[in-house]
Image (spheres, helix red, strand yellow):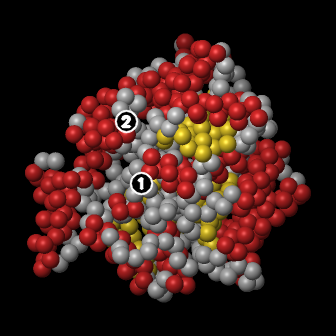
Amino acid sequence: MAARSWFLALRNALRYFPPEIQKKLVLEFAEELRLYGHIYMYRFFPDIEMRAYPIKDYPCKTKSAAAIMLMIMNNLDPSVAQFPQELVTYGGNGQVFSNWAQFWLVMQYLSEMTEEQTLVMYSGHPLGLFPSHRYAPRLIITNGMVIPNYSTRDEYEKMFALGVTMYGQMTAGSYCYIGPQGIVHGTVLTVLNAGRRYLKAEDLSGKVFVTSGLGGMSGAQAKAAVIAGCVGIIAEVDEAALLKRYKQGWLMEISNNLDHCIARLRDARKNKIALSLGYHGNVVDLWERLVYELDTTGELLVDLGSDQTSCHNPFSGGYYPVQLGFEEAKQLLSTNPGKFRTMVQESLRRHVAAINRLADKGMFFWDYGNAFLLEAQRAGDNFEYFFPSLFSGRIGDIFSLGFGPFRWVCTSGDPQDLATADSIAMSVLEDSIRQGVSTSVKQQYHDNIRWIREAGRHSLVVGSQARILYSDQRGRVSIAMAINRAISEGRIKVCLFPLDMSPGNSFSLTDMAVQNFVGDAFRGATWVALHNGGGVGWGEVINGGFGLVLDGSTEAEERAKMMLSWDVSNGVARRCWSGNDYAYETICQAMKENVTLKVTLPQKVVDEDILEQALQS
């Protein structure tokens, strides 16, 4: 950093403190800036057990404020967060706040907030409590809302060092993270649907899924493989992350020996045993070993492949080059970041070369929305096959049907409340199937019913008592209303709140996420959030999100109906206009069920020859 930037970063940090203690703090902050490139204010790290306490334990004037406090502390729980001391929940740099002074200020504001105030957050910084009204959101969050011309990775690094912005990922900076369970569910559905589409298989026993990453969200992949019934081999370079997932019971076995990994893979594949095996090593070595097995035995040992390294942040520790060991690579990153970058790109080229070789023989690979394909292309890789991203390849059709992630948290902290909510959700989906739904919707409902049953069996709760499923508009509204009734009847002790993230931009257009953010705010959301970067990376996507407290009241039910219907219909209408047939059918059905919904439908160009004729003329 230039001297002027150091000056500004220190001055920015000291704004949180009165003059009488600034002289003492400035030397500490300068040392943090020198060592870490950012001022985290470690001296203010809370000396408390950071976790999601029952909502009644929070000293607040409103349930909404207490619910927000609960989720903030859940995001920073050491059993949940990837780097809690740096306020990073997942993804290597997805933060809740930029520094610990912000944490304390936010908690103070929430303890004071009434139903006539709204807390405004600017990229981790609490701007303050502002007068509003009881129907307004209690919290509005924006993260990284940078003018597009400055929304580059280099500019982010400068602004982050100055303490004026931060990267909130999708659910870290919006206080919506429920631990790795969220991505377990998404990965289960991804693997199941990939099996159906590309392997023509409903039963994945004996099928092999190879991927990488066991850190934050990626730690979910091991559980997902077992729940889907396949053989999962997951590579991880960081032994601490590997052991954390093993001790939590999310990994069945671990090994640092590729010979052993291949032997276990063959045995589980032959005997159709569901297995999650963590390989302590670089995934490029694993992919290249699978190529070696193909070349020497003629046997393709992998059916499905993906990647969940933090490739949105590849040159700052999100992806480690195969040429070096983990500790050696970390040292190089610190001493020679330029050389580290070059080695990462070399590693990415080897990574893709191995994937291409296996894909040539029938393996199917997809990008999990982590910018792996994007960074590989930037590194100069030539893909011999089109590998779809998570959204275009698997999630796209589901989103077009109106399905997407739908989370809830039992704020009592009581596992029995979660069990009751699970039962309610399954009953709602089963009732919908009996009443009649399309074949494609029916398949998704069955997958989610299976998921809820398996989630209970596999003890997926880490942190708050939470659950996730994917549902369409009908399912979301019906589940929210049923849970709200259960609260009013006393079957669930305290309020729950559905949490959702609006999908990001499409083809560089981000109208949908912004419209969802705004529309949710005036349709009843307890809090709303808008982020630069999502899970793909700074400057690559915009995502919106919301939280909604359910307290058993009639007002909460009306808010849920209005907001959830809008949030889904907006996304489906956008997909309909882009030409998706599933979305066209879905939004037409929604208009039949709600006569106040009027969507502009696209007219098809029946004769595309007229386009060619126009161009030739």
Can residue 586 be seen from the camera position used here?
Answer: yes
Q: Closest to the observer: 535 or 540?
A: 535
- Residue at 56% x, 44% y is 254
- Residue at 31% x, 56% y is 165
Q: Image quadrant of residue 271?
A: top right
**Amino acid type at image mark 2:** Gly
Task: Return the x and y of residue 277 as percentages of the image width and height.
Answer: 60, 42
Task: Return the x and y of residue 236 as percentages of the image width and height.
Answer: 48, 41
**Amino acid type at image mark 1:** Gly
Separation (CA) of disc 2 from disc 1: 25 Å
Task: Return the x and y of residue 364 as percentages of the image width and height.
Answer: 64, 28
145, above or below 481, in the image? above
Residue 94, numbered label: 1
Q: Closest to the observer: 402 or 308?
A: 308
- Residue at 71% x, 42% y is 274
Q: Closest to the observer: 201 or 292?
A: 292
Q: Image quadrant of residue 451?
A: bottom right
Residue corresponding to mark 2: 325
Looking at the rendered structure, the secondary structure element under dot 2 is loop
Can residue 582 be seen from the camera position used here?
Answer: no
